[in-house]
Image (cartoon, grey):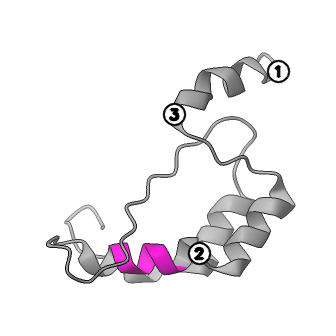
Amino acid sequence: HDEKGAPLPDNVTPEHLVAIITSLPEGVTELACHPAVDADLDSQYLHERLLETRALCDERVRASIAATAVTLCSFASVPTLRSRLPPQ
């Protein structure tokens, strides 16, 4: 959503996600997503959540993750990953 709360469905595409992934700097980056697979979810963000699921599961996104050596992890892993980074 933009600063006024309007949805931005063009930003929830595999192409946009690939562009984000391939431009990430070295280090730890949080990318927040709230995907959904069922249309019966009662949420004002339902449409975007369904789009997020499609984008996250797209083969081009998986390929960009593999090509850039991005490591997907939970927050529990962040301290360990940060300790492996060179000092800045």
Label 3 crowd bin: few (<14), some (14–19), many (20+), radius 10 Å: few
**Quarter of the N terminus within the rendering:** bottom left
Mark 3–mark 2 Cα distance, whole angstroms, equals 21 Å
Q: Which residue is mark 3?
A: 75
Looking at the image, residue 53 sits to the left or right of residue 79; the answer is: left
Residue 34: where, in percent of width, then height? Answer: 37, 61
Q: Position of residue 19 (x, y in %)?
A: 67, 69
Residue contact between numbered discs 3 and 2, judged by CB atoms under 8 Å: no
Closer to the observer: label 2 or label 1?
2
Q: Where is residue 79 drawn, in percent x and y?
A: 61, 21
As for residue 23 lying within the magenta part, the answer is no
Examine the image and state in which quarter residue 10 appears: bottom left
Q: In the rendered structure, are the residues bearing label 1 and label 3 in contact, judged by CB atoms less than 8 Å apart? A: no
Q: CA distance from mark 1 to mark 3?
A: 20 Å
Q: Secondary structure at mark 2?
A: loop
Q: Which residue is mark 1?
A: 86
Q: Residue at x 61, y 30 (%)?
A: 77
- Name the residue located 42 percent from the left edge and 80 percent from the top edge: 51
Tell me which amino acid carries mark 3.
Phe
Q: Is residue 70 left or right of residue 4?
A: right
Residue indicated by mark 2:
57
Between discs 3 and 2, the one toward the N terminus: 2
The image quadrant that residue 44 belongs to is: bottom left
